[in-house]
Image (tube, rainbow, N blue to C red):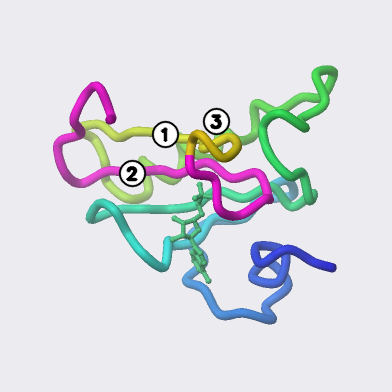
Amino acid sequence: MATLFTRIINGEIPAEIVYQDEHCVAFKDINPQAPVHILIVTRQEIPGLADLPEDGDHKFLLNAAKKIAEQMGLAGGYRLVINQGLDAGQTVDHLHVHLLGGRPMNWPPG
Ligand code: AMP
């Protein structure tokens, strides 16, 4: 069965898409934790970072994040987050990067 994010990518569930390329699609998080909160989702259904093949070329995720941050005007900075597994609070088992910005970020994240 397709994941929630694949259904968004396929247009079956609405989302505000802000970027896409051959490897990933990015859309606004439905429950934003910052003024800018974008999810960058792999087109391929990979459950999480722990399942990412080590021999693949995955720089597209960082390149997409950089481009979207520029597009969103986040010149002051931003944060990228990948929640992997239960301890990190991952709720959707489809690899995605959170791009958060538009407010100061605390460190440590808690
Ligand atoms: P994670 O907890 O890291 O797996 O992140 C999953 C994210 O998906 C959460 O921040 C949710 O708010 C977000 N989310 C869940 N359903 C949707 C949806 N239909 N459209 C956009 N974002 C969603």
Question: Please, which residue is most extreme toward the top here?
Answer: 55
Q: Which amino acid does the dot numbered 2 rest on?
A: Leu
Q: In the depicted view, which residue is nearer to us: 28 or 31?
A: 31
Question: Which label's residue is closer to the chain start, 3 or 2?
Answer: 3
Query: Which residue bears the numbered disc 3?
Result: 62
Q: Position of residue 94 (x, y in %)?
A: 68, 50
| Cα distance between the residues tagged 1 and 3 | 9 Å
Q: Which amino acid does the dot numbered 1 rest on?
A: Leu
* Secondary element at tag 2: strand
Q: Is residue 47 above or below residue 75?
A: below
Q: Is residue 104 above or below residue 32?
A: above
* Secondary element at tag 3: helix
Q: Position of residue 90 (x, y in %)?
A: 54, 45
| Cα distance between the residues tagged 3 and 2 | 14 Å
Q: In the depicted view, which residue is nearer to us: 45 or 101?
A: 45
What is the number of the mark on residue 80?
1
Query: Which residue bears the numbered disc 2?
Result: 100
Dot 3 surroundings within 10 Å: few (below 14), some, or many (20 or more)?
A: few
Which residue range is magenta in the image?
A: 89-110
